Amino acid sequence: MSLNKVLIIGNAAADAVANDKGTRTTFRAIVNESYKDDKGETQERSEGFNVVAFKKLGEIAAQYVKKGQLVYVEGSQRTRSYEKDGEKKYVTEVVADRIRLLGSKPKAETAAPAPAESEEEAPIDFE
C-alpha cells in the first residue's frame, strides 16, 4: 500500500494564473513556520509550494485565489521534467484535489462571493 497526500495552509504569493487554454492554473503558496532552535529561541522559516489545479478546480482557482489569500490545499506531490536551453529541468508541484479559501476575503472586486453569516468570513471550499 502507498499514499501520496499533501496538506498545506499558506498564503498565495501572487494571484493564481491560468494557462492560455485555461486548462492548467498555477500559484505559489508560502507556508510560514516557527520552531525553537538549540538555544530555545524562536526562529521563523518559510517554505514555498508550487500548486497546480486542472479543469474546473483550476478555473475556480484562477478566479478566486488572489495574492495574500490564506488557502488550504489538499493534493498529491508530483515531479515533472522539461527541457530548457538543452538542459533537463525538474519541478515539484502539489497537484490540487481541493482548495479552500480561509480567513477574510481579499479586498479586490473579484473576491469570492460567499455570504458570511457573521463578521468572521466563512471558508470557501472548492473540489
Image (spheres, rainbow, N blue to C red):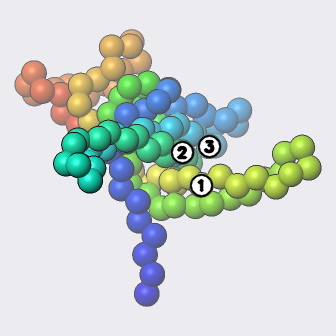
Name the residue nearer the viewer: 17 or 60. 17
Q: How far is disc 3 from disc 1 in space, using C-alphas?
A: 15 Å
Q: In the rendered image of this protein, does residue 60 appear above or below residue 126?
A: above
Residue type, mark 3 in image:
Arg
Which residue occupies 58% across, 31% down? 17
Closer mark to the observer between disc 2 and disc 3: 2
- Crowding at dot 2, Cα within 10 Å, few <14 / some 14-19 / many 20+, comes out as some
Which residue occupies 27% across, 50% down? 37
Give the residue at mark 1: 92
Outermost right residue: 86
SS under mark 2: strand
Q: In the rendered image of this protein, does residue 81 appear above or below residue 21?
A: below
Q: In the rendered image of this protein, does residue 7 appear above or below residue 51?
A: below
SS under mark 3: strand
Q: Which quarter of the image is occupied by the N terminus? A: bottom left
Q: Is residue 3 visible?
A: yes
Residue type, mark 2 in image:
Asn
Closer mark to the observer between disc 3 and disc 1: 1
Give the residue at mark 2: 50
Q: How far is disc 2 from disc 3 in space, using C-alphas?
A: 13 Å
- Crowding at dot 1, Cα within 10 Å, few <14 / some 14-19 / many 20+, comes out as few
Q: Position of residue 46 (x, y in %)?
A: 40, 40
Give the residue at mark 3: 24
